[in-house]
Amino acid sequence: MMIIDAHIHLWNRLHGEDTGTDREALRWGKARQGDRIYYATPPAFEDSLSTYERALAHMDWLGIERAVVLQEFMDGKQDDYLAQVRRECPHRFSCMALFDQHYFDDPMGAFKEAVDEKKLQGFLVKSPSPFPEIAIPKLMPIWEACAERGLPIVLKNGVPEDVRKLIQALPNLKIVLSHFAGIFDPPETYYERLQIVADNPNVFMDSGALTYRQRYPFAEAKERLHEAVEKVGAGKIAWGSDYPRPPLVADNSYKQQLEFITIECDFLTEDQRKEILGGTALRVYKWD
């Protein structure tokens, strides 16, 4: 059984240049944003960096063969670093570009830079903040190109009405609703997204952050996953740890994130477990 972590974060430096934020990595997991000190990684990370070499060490320890690298504005745009990751370790990682204001200024120019030049393999799009709508005419050439090339877009949140517009325009576009389809949003919004996953063959969800602020063995997350499997099917769900976020792989552990699926979710059949741990991500994302 191939195991793929469909939600991790990598960076070789923390910065806020793309958002005008004063941010830097410190030591032993800590980082600074303005006057605030916070933990960007577990305290065992001496340099507070999440490099691909460090991720590979954790993955090899647990038998995780591949990972999907997402991005967040809180880390600073990492397209350049992920282009390096693609050159140096292309078979272990599928790397998403961070969708930012440049895509509104020059849609296809920014697309070609990310995909054709840097060889990134999809996009992380944060909506409705900072981008309230993405199913707009100006951006359609990007999404059309993604659909043609089989590149997924990973939506962090997303207004259900906007997501439906995008699906209606491009039913072949692969869309992943991150953070378990926005599990921490109001229940009516979450369940609306869950229905979208159930209703559309090219819409999926990852489980990143599902266990956030819970103690192992994650009883509430187990109920949520069971409900989602019944609603959308295991073939629509990809396991993700949100590595190396401290509340997910330090308060508990990376090993426990994996054992949540392999041991604790005893309601899963072996076929369902294979889908969640690797099958879904293998089909949805691009791999060398």
Image: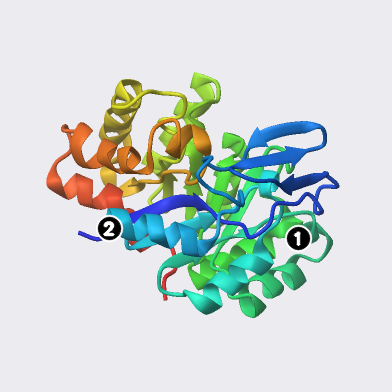
* On screen, residue 67 above or below 233: below
Horizontal and vertical percent for residue 163?
57, 43
Q: Is residue 275 left or right of residue 155?
A: left
Q: Is residue 258 left or right of residue 174?
A: left
Q: With respect to residue 75, does 38 lie above or below? A: above
Per the image, the residue denoted by label 2 is: 63
Return the disc, 2 or 1, that comes first in the chain's sequence: 2
Measuring from the top left, give residue 38's x and y in whole percent.
66, 33
- Report if the CB atoms under discs 2 and 1 are less than 8 Å apart: no
Residue in the foreground of this view, choosing between 192 and 184? 184
Q: Position of residue 282 (x, y in %)?
A: 34, 62
| Quadrant containing the N terminus in the rendered view | bottom left
In front of the other: 35 or 109 = 35
Q: Badge 1: how crowded within 10 Å, few (<14), some, or many (20+)?
A: some
Taking 233 as reference, is 195 left or right?
Answer: right
Q: Residue 146's image quarter?
A: bottom right
Any part of residue 64 in sight: no
Mark 1: secondary structure: helix
Residue at 49% across, 38% down: 179
* Residue at disc 2, secondary structure: loop
Reply above or below: 130 against 106: above
Which residue occupies 64% across, 46% down?
27
Res 156 seen here: yes
Residue at 51 percent across and 37 percent down: it is: 246
Amino acid at the residue labelled 1: Tyr
Image disc number at residue 179: none
